[in-house]
Amino acid sequence: MIPVACAAITLVTLLYVFYLPGKLHLGQKKTRAAYLGERKEAIYENLRDLNFEYKAGKFPEADYLALQESLEAEAAGVMAEIARLEDSANSEQHRGRKGRRVAH
């Protein structure tokens, strides 16, 4: 009788832990552009924090310059990718309009 009770408790516990209801709300699917926008904001915030902490005397100048350079390089890469995405989106829109006739 005890093994049956233990098996039942184990089964109920596993079902409780691992059961997924039929409808899960996973949130909005994030696009690459949205991710890059969030990443850009995070980098700029890190640059502002770094500048503030350097002025407060928490970083030696060599460390500050190295961190600033790496954050600026990362920001440039993110901005370049955002520009590429926008250019490709604009060229797709332009191609879509080119084939259509305008009704008056």
Image (spheres, rainbow, N blue to C red):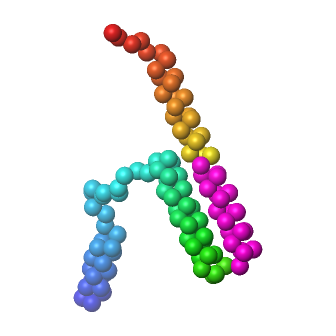
Q: Nearer the viewer, residue 47 or 87?
A: 47
Q: Nearer the viewer, residue 28 or 41?
A: 41
Tell me: residue 33, above or below residue 13: above
Magenta stretch encompasses residue 73? yes
Residue 12 in view of the camera: yes
**What residue appears at the point 34 percent right and 69 percent down from the top-left corner?**
18
Q: Residue furthest bottom?
A: 2
Q: Is residue 90 above or below residue 34?
A: above
Where in the figure is residue 60, as x and y percent of width and height?
Answer: 71, 79
User: Residue 31: horizontal and vertical position, in percent?
Assistant: 46, 48
Quadrant for the N terminus in the image: bottom left
Outermost residue toward the top? 104
Front residue of 96/62: it is 62
Q: Relative to 101, is 4 above or below?
A: below
Name the chief secondary structure element in magenta.
helix
Q: Is residue 70 left or right of residue 6?
A: right
The furthest residue to the right: 62
Q: Is residue 49 above or below residue 35?
A: below
Instruction: Return the x and y of residue 10 as percentages of the image width and height.
Output: 32, 80
Please name the residue shown 68% across and 68% down the image. Answer: 67
Residue drawn at point x = 33 percent, y = 9 percent:
104
- Image-based side of 9 in relation to 64, left or right: left
| Quarter holding residue 56 | bottom right
Q: Is residue 50 left or right of residue 38?
A: right
User: Picture coordinates of residue 78 (x, y %)?
Assistant: 60, 52
Residue plotted at (51% across, 34% down): 89
In this view, the residue in front, 9 or 3, is: 9
Q: Residue 39, can we see it?
A: no
**Number of numbered discs on residues:** 0
Region in magenta = 60-79
Q: Is residue 78 magenta?
A: yes
